Amino acid sequence: MKSNKGFTLIELLIVIAIIGILAVTIMQVMRNVRFKAKNASFRSSVSSIKTVWTACCDGGGNIYTKGASEGNDIYICDDASIIDAVYPGDENIGEVTVDTQCDDGRYEVTATPGTKNTGSCTSVTYDETGEVSNVGC
């Protein structure tokens, strides 16, 4: 009598199929985590400059807009004596649109993500009280 000590072709194919299913599942989870991290990075960048927007309006200045192609040497406030800060580079925040301009310390600003933040966020809107809305986040 002869005994075979090895795996059959069916057993090997089943193991390979299980490994493939696990790999696809893990890749999908990692993709979702990457999108969430990019969204969090963008929202954090916008939130961090909220204080400067507030200081600018409280000091009587106006908030500059920022085009998507402009670099990081665009000042946030039109009066450098109030606050001397610039927007983050294009890789963080792409475009800033001022929807309501400093009316008695009130403002509303919408920002879009830059080239490095290619998550699912398309825009986030802030006012003097905090985040008003976000699209796609």
Image (cartoon, rainbow, N blue to C red):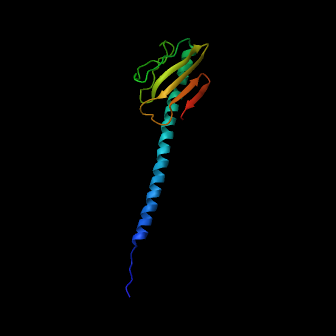
Q: Percent from the top left, x then y, of residue 63?
A: 51, 16
Quadrant in the picture for residue 90: top left
Q: Nearer the viewer, residue 44 or 17?
A: 17
**Quadrant, the C terminus:** top right
Image position of 65 with respect to 94: above or below: above
Residue visible at 57% across and 20% down in the picture: 108
Q: Which residue is drawn at 43% across and 24% down?
A: 68
Indicate the position of residue 101 as horizontal and vertical percent values. Answer: 55, 15
* Residue nearer the viewer, 85 or 62: 62
Give coordinates of residue 62: x percent, y percent. 52, 13
Question: Which residue is more in the foreground, 64 or 99?
Answer: 99
- Residue 83 vs residue 2, the one in the foreground: 2
Residue 40 point in image, percent of width and height: 52, 36
Q: In this view, does 112 lie above or below 80?
A: below
Total count of labels:
0
Furthest residue in direction front, as rendered:
10
Q: Which residue is drawn at 37% across and 85% down?
A: 2
Q: In which quarter of the image is the N terminus?
A: bottom left
Q: Which residue is drawn at 60% across and 26% down?
A: 130
